[in-house]
């Protein structure tokens, strides 16, 4: 519980946290940001790491001259692309082994359904998943398990990463230091988190209503 509270405090006060990292590590901060984003997108066990808020805060510091916007965009995009690629590879590797006729939890029919879903909606799902915390961590993993063709996945992986990184970093660069934003940065970060989670909450609510009707 204490760890979760510390993580929540880190995310809500991401401006202070990132400022402390920059002051302590200088240019090495780029590497730290790369690792955080890579782990959030590349490891299914770390979907709780900050993504949207971290990009926005990084853009804010770029506007102050503490970081370079062009370097941020390139490195963060690379981290997001590489993270999804690794996540996909892990899913692809364990998929055939986990989904067998003998498995109680990973039935082969689930694999077939997942494969069909990503063949039909895979590109759109990979791009849209970038904007939803937690979902963006599991989408490439499921795509790999489902046997989605890598060339198809890779194209939308790159597109999704760029469309995700640029708006958030540029948003922080352009608006992060506007007085009303700067003076209410915690509320802005909280709003970003809520808006990011909103699509998942709406989908859960629709599924719940559909289940009740069924």
Image (cartoon, rainbow, N blue to C red):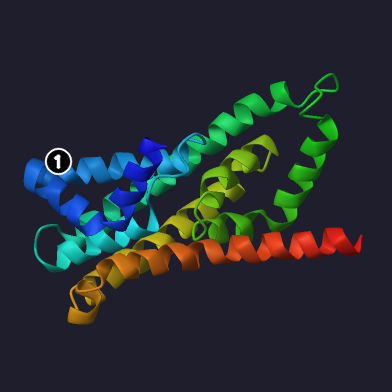
Side (left or right) of 15 relative to 24: right
**Which residue is painted at 42% across and 37% down in the image?**
1
Side (left or right) of 49 relative to 66: right
What element does badge 1 sit on? helix
Displayed quadrant of residue 104: top right
Q: Is residue 107 above or below residue 19?
A: above
Q: Toward the viewer: 177 or 13?
A: 13
Q: Toward the viewer: 151 or 31?
A: 31
Q: Toward the viewer: 79 or 1?
A: 1
Displayed quadrant of residue 184: bottom left
Q: Toward the viewer: 66 or 71?
A: 66
Badge 1 crowding class, 10 Å Cα cut-off, few under 14, some 14 to 19, many 20 or more, is: few
**Which residue is painted at 46% across and 54% down in the image?**
158
Q: Quadrant of the C terminus?
A: bottom right
Displayed quadrant of residue 3: top left
Location of mark 1 (residue): 28
Total count of labels = 1
Give the percent coordinates (x, y) of residue 10: 29, 49
**Which residue is painted at 62% across and 62% down in the image?**
201
Give the percent coordinates (x, y) of residue 135: 56, 51
């Amino acid at each position: 519980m204490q760890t979760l509270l510390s993580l929540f405090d880190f995310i809500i006060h991401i401006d202070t946290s990132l400022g402390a990292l920059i002051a302590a590590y200088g240019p090495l901060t780029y590497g730290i940001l790369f690792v955080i984003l890579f782990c959030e997108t590349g490891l299914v066990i770390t979907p709780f790491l900050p993504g949207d808020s971290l990009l926005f805060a990084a853009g804010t510091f770029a506007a102050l001259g503490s970081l370079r916007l062009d370097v941020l965009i390139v490195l963060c995009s690379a981290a997001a692309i590489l993270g999804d690629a690794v996540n996909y590879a892990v899913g692809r590797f364990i998929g055939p082994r986990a989904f067998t006729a003998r498995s109680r939890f990973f039935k082969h029919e689930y694999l077939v359904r997942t494969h069909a879903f990503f063949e039909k909606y895979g590109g759109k799902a990979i791009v849209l998943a970038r904007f939803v915390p937690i979902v963006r961590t599991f989408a490439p993993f499921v795509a790999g398990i489902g046997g989605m063709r890598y060339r198809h996945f890779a194209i939308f992986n790159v597109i999704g990463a760029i469309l995700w990184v640029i708006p958030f970093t540029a948003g922080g660069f352009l608006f992060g230091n506007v007085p009303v934003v700067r003076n209410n940065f915690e509320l802005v970060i909280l709003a970003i988190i809520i808006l990011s989670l909103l699509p998942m909450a709406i989908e859960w609510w629709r599924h719940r209503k559909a289940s009740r009707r069924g």
